[in-house]
Image: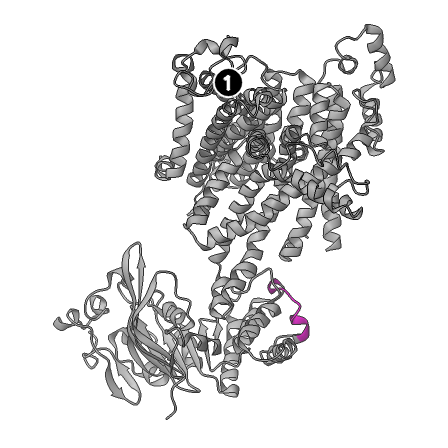
Amino acid sequence: MSTPVLQVDGLAVHLRGEGGLARILDDVALTVPRGGTLGVVGESGCGKSTLLRAILGILPRGAETPSGAILFEGRDILSDDGASARGRIGFVPQDPYLSLNPVFRAGDQILEIMRRHAPGSRRDHRDRLIELFRAVQLPDPEGALRKYPHQFSGGQRQRLLIAAALSCDPALVVADEPTTALDVTTQREILALLRALVADRGLSLLFVTHDFGVLAAICADVAVLYAGRVAEAGPTRAVLDAPRHPYTRMLLACHPDRATDLAGIPGTVPAATAQPQGCRFHPRCPIVQPGCAAQAPPMVALGAGRGVACPWHEVALA
Amino acid sequence: MTALRLLLRDRVAAFGGLIVLFALVVAIFAPWIAPYPDDAFESHIMQRLRPPSAEFPFGTDNLGRDILSRVILGTRNALLVAVAVVVAAMAIGVPIGLAAGWREGWLSETLMRVTDVFLAVPQLILALALGQLIAPGIGAAMVALALTYWPFFARTVFAETRRLRSALFVDALAGIGASPTRILLLHVLPNAAPAVLVRATIGMGFTILTAAILGFLGVGAAPPSPDWGLAVSEARQHLPEAWWFPTFPGLAILLLVLGFNLLGDGLRDAADPRLRRSRR
Amino acid sequence: MARYILKRLLLALPALLGLVVLTFVLSRVVPADPAATLAGDAATPALIAEIRAQYGLDRPILEQAVIHLRQVLTGDFGRSVFSGRPVAEEILQRLPATLELTFAALFIATVLGIPLGLVAALHHNGVVDNLVRVLSVGGLAIASFWLAIMLQLVFSMELDILPLRGRVDVALGMPPRVTGFVLVDSLVAGRFDIFLDGCRHLVLPAITLSLPGLATIARFTRSGVLETLQKDFVLYARAAGYGRVRLAAIYVLRNAVTLVVTQVGLLFGALISGAVAVEAIFDWPGLGTYAVQAILSADYKALLAVTLVVGVVYAVVNVLVDVAQVVIDPRVAEEGR
């Protein structure tokens, strides 16, 4: 078996801020196999964005990674000499409206990225970009090079950004809820495009979202994040059909097939500065047991690539 | 009151406020604080151009007058001129801004175009021309400064009125039959007050500076007035020997203008939460 | 783009026309008796009457206004009471000196102010940041005439390393006039010695004049960069692997500079105001000294002409600023459409 494209191991991210030390991520482990598609799902504030920023090397000032590793093609990109490997991670941001600098031509901004990370001459880059524009089905690929961001629609901008993510021949594409800022029709088009690209080019994809529907449409595997920890992980189909962690089970209870909203659970995600001891879900958990507050539950392997961070995963919900 | 607390927490602004307060106290009690209060008018040729000493901490000027005393006495003039100019400019600019902002139409257009014309000429140049044409002297300079500063108030109040005019509570008031005058004076004006206050504070600093330039150029205060700008002008003939002669009046200008500018900045931050971010 | 510039120029016209009206009102309405003002202190009634007829002051006010407008449009500002020469000619003679000084000041303010603001924002709360904060309030609080005198005192009188006054050394003389700018004309004439001397003469007045601009530009660059750094596209650019230096110096700065450019336009008014006092102190033969001289000799025609010319220059600069903004940020032109 070859090394996975991305392997996150025991990752912790702390942020020192005004409210004290926030343990945003704690002992997070996940894997994106070569050619695999992993979805990371969770409520806002669960640490999805921080995980993404850690992978992309853009953690905010004051953030530390006291433990863990992020192995990209076997090299730890948290270490100084591994950081250069990040050039081969493509990134599709959440908001296509805000992610391009309005005062530069969109094409020039992408060419700048290629100049930094892709081999070849300026002309090569240009040709390759036009080809990519065609691949992401951007109308008038040649003309697009001369346009400013505000001259594109939202969906077209997201296509531009997908092209940018592909421009340096990435081994992994990281996407941060790339459809939330778009209207429903455009969302569907962009998802279809991503799915086609993943299939055609054999891309490895890490896809962050809060939307199970989107997740089901594009990811083979899923990792459910709660309050900075992985609650449950496994093949998307299996997890959606038979969730095991009380948190996932409650999430999916109303729409066992396609839960789209994660807000239907009493209580709220705890503040990162005041995480409960033990299992972080226990204050909201309907099947909470005496030991839950004492110790963080380890991942229990369930077979078939599944795992759940709850020793009581077989107890029925009240 | 929250604004006041915010202002006090902003140390730099509080420092500015302290300077202004200090200047106010000095201005009010000037004749009692100044070591030689009579030096506003009296000259003592025998002790001219003495360097700073225990007797004359800031030295003496070309007519043997104690510079410290004249700086202290000049505080009163500087503040009086600035307050008078700013109040007069407000008296012109605020009603114009209210009137132009309340209704759209030819009156509003005309008023704002006139405002633009006044803003199209640098204030000092306009003040020079006006001051000279009316009659050289401190009175004319004050009138000229007021006539060049009112457009800033008109602009500020205009913008606030336009913003508030479409506010829900104004519609509600009009609905229950409140007259436009009543709405403008009792409801719109108090809402525009913070912006006007900020403008006024910054205007104080600006006026002190511009009045000093006018004094320096001989269009403002006339001798023997203990005017700071005038003192720097008189000092020019006695350089480089009497370095203390222009230094201290100039520092006084710097300190007072700095006080008003810092205070104005702080007020702006306290009054407008959106701008608070940019300071950080 | 061309359409935008044209539109912007047309927008400036009403203000300029208003300015002509304003100067008219200033000259005919503000003085109780303009003819007496013109005649001066020692005027006989006969002389006043003669002047009244000569300047058309006895005609109806509207007719006077039309004549005034026609004169202004043809560049006829009358003759100076002081020198007897046409005011327009004297102003043209002196305008380049003022422009050279203000451009130099603007150059210093920009070349120092933008990097200072950038470094301050990047090292938020660092040494440079605090320096910029002090500068940005202090620079606007200093009276230009006082700073000028203090600089003269230190660098010209005590240290004797820079000239006290004037544009070039009398011994060298002015270069043959082509543009009226000493630094340009000296190079055209191939007189490098005059060029250097011109620079030396320019240093103190330009520094004095640049301080308020430097303060404003550094301040706005700082807040602009701080604001831009918060934007999503900066985060995206970092994630996509832009180089650090390029990100700060070009990518972020260009956004921040749109704010600064507007300020430069507004600053120009302050610069010209400041130039009046600074020119007077450094004996700089520009519009400022001309205005002061006009005040001292009660030469109101000259004074009004200066007001008008300054207003026009100011308007033109602000049009240029708007154009520059479109070049930097293409969205501006579309919003204005």
Between B100 and C58, the one lying in front of the other is C58
Between A270 and C226, the one lying in front of the other is C226
Estimate the x, y position of residue C131 in percent, counting from the top left: 46, 44
Q: Residue furthest left?
A: A290
Q: Quadrant of the N terminus of chain A?
A: bottom left
Is residue C14 in view? no
Q: Is residue A8 left or right of residue A124?
A: left
Query: Which of the 4 quarters of the picture holds residue B105?
Result: top right
Q: Quadrant of the C terminus of chain A?
A: bottom left
B142 relative to A46, above or below: above
Is residue B245 in view? yes
The amino acid on which the numbered mark 1 sits, given as a three-letter code, is Asn
Q: Which residues are magenta?
A: A142-150
Q: Is residue C56 left or right of residue A41?
A: right
Q: Chain of mark 1?
A: B
Estimate the x, y position of residue A131 in percent, counting from the top left: 62, 80
A103 relative to A121, above or below: above
Between A304 and A267, the one lying in front of the other is A304
Residue picked out by circle 1: B77
In the structure shown, which secondary structural element does the residue marked by tag 1 occupy?
Answer: helix
Q: Residues within 10 Å of mark 1 (few under 14, many from 20)?
A: some
Q: Is residue C184 left or right of residue A112?
A: right
Estimate the x, y position of residue A198 in percent, counting from the top left: 49, 84
Estimate the x, y position of residue A45 in percent, counting from the top left: 34, 64
Judge whether residue B108 is colored magenta: no
Judge whether residue A144 is colored magenta: yes
Q: Is residue C188 left or right of residue A149?
A: right
State the residue at coordinates (56%, 29%).
C146
